[in-house]
Amino acid sequence: MSSITVIGTQWGDEGKGKIVDWLSAQADIVVRFQGGHNAGHTLVVNGEVYKLNLLPSGIVRRGTLSIIGNGVVVNPWHLLEEIEKVRLQSVEVSPDNLLLSESACLILPPHWEVDQARERASGTGKIGTTGRGIGPAYEDKVARRAIRVCDLFDAKLLQERVAQLVKHHNIYLQAYGASEIKAEALFEDLQKLVPKLKPYVGQSWRVLGEAKNKRILFEGAQGVMLDIDHGTYPFVTSSNTIAANAFIGCGFVAENNHVLGVAKAYTTRVGSGPFPTRETGKAGDVMGERGAEFGTVTGRQRGCGWFDSVQMRQAVQVAGIQSLVLTKIDVLDAFENIPVCVAYELDNQRIDYLPAGQLSQASVKPIYEHLPGWQSVTQGIHNWSDMPAQAKAYVERLEQLAGVPISVISTSPEREDTILRFQQAAEDSIDMPDKFNIVTLAEARV
Ligand code: IMP
């Protein structure tokens, strides 16, 4: 058995879709383990574009089992709509290729109503959530108030739990001046879903436990800096986005797992919160335009800035990342010189980590090292040897600063525009991790 966990290393939107799509073509099982339909994964397979929020990327691949693990928060209406949407694109979805964990917690109307009302009431202090109820749903999980998928199949219990849940949230909704939820109507709506959802429901821990000699891809959503424990709290999502959560989020511990972090060659962020290397001048606009930096879920424009190696080193450490995929390097083709953040300044001191405090995070100033740009086209390159010397030097410097090898470089959204650096690792004497499962999982795919 070999497995890979793919996670974002920055604030999400690192371009995980392309790499996950590429790896899922080789995987037998693809597992989502956290987050919900706040994620937006775009896949391009044989020219067809699929936009997924909740379904694991394996769904578009014949013969691949997709698992929505217990750690995911599931909006059941959205799930059914997404299934219908991909069916319209000729994707087969059946209990043979989709499993929904019976222990996953549901996102229900009170969750998105509270999420949105809270954001509206927060003024400048808002988190900038996707408004999809993710936070309130995880709050209910921890408060032991959530309704789980398995509760749908016991009408009496469901009715009671819906009544309790709605009572709790109506207090907030009333206080926010928002419309209250009617428990009975919600209960009836949920009952209508039962026959549609039931065929997919099962035990992720058991199915994974019985899988022998399978290649498993754990598909992370968001990024390390949005992790509830290790991110820029409180401007984070409400789940653990790091690889350590993959096993909790499906009830299975994979041995010999490779943790692959996906990093943009620069940095972007949507929503509120600290972003030390944000570039508010023209350079930021250039990156935004060249990189088409608009959110796939909310359509919001993403802030853009330079690569932050302080943040990256920390992400690599807390998430146990063994190698990196560097995406969108072609976006930097336009620049004469490229700043890279190598340390922060805080209270006249040089520091090499992102402090935990909200105020400190907002106050750190990046200290830059300036690397020469290459000002030529890297878009579409698929051999390391064809990269301009300055681009190679840029990658090697990031690698040195991040502390792990950059095993894959993406030079455009097209699948073939990918440099498999690990294949050249031996020649270039790059020290790649021992348990390097990408080779077995992704062999000769590009
Ligand atoms: P929530 O996950 O909707 O609660 O939003 C919390 C924060 O995470 C906000 O800053 C969102 O913009 C951000 N966020 C959530 N999901 C994604 C994602 O898939 N990509 C990028 N940012 C995200």
Image (cartoon, rainbow, N blue to C red):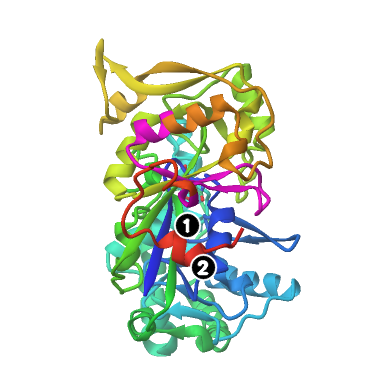
Whether 442 is drawn above or below 304: the answer is below
Q: Are the residues tagged 2 and 1 within 8 Å (C-beta)?
A: yes
**Residue at the limit of the structure toward the front, as seen here:** 427
At 43% across and 46% down in the image, what residue appears? 324
Cβ(mark 1) to ligand 1 < 8 Å?
A: yes
Give the SS element for disc 2. loop
Residue 289 location, x and y as percent?
69, 31
The image's mark for residue 75 is 2
Whether 420 is drawn above or below 248: the answer is above
Residue 282 location, x and y as percent?
63, 17
At 27% across and 45% down in the image, what residue appears? 318
Question: For residue 6, what is the image quadrant?
Answer: bottom left
Q: Earlier in the sequence, mark 2 or mark 1?
A: 2
The three-letter code of the residue at mark 1 reads Gly
**Residue at the limit of the structure toward the top, as seen here:** 348
Q: Quadrant of the N terminus?
A: bottom left
Residue 195 falls within the magenta-colored stretch: no
The three-letter code of the residue at mark 2 reads Asn
Q: How far apart are the two marked residues, 2 and 1, measured between alpha carbons?
A: 9 Å
Extent of the magenta region? 397-423
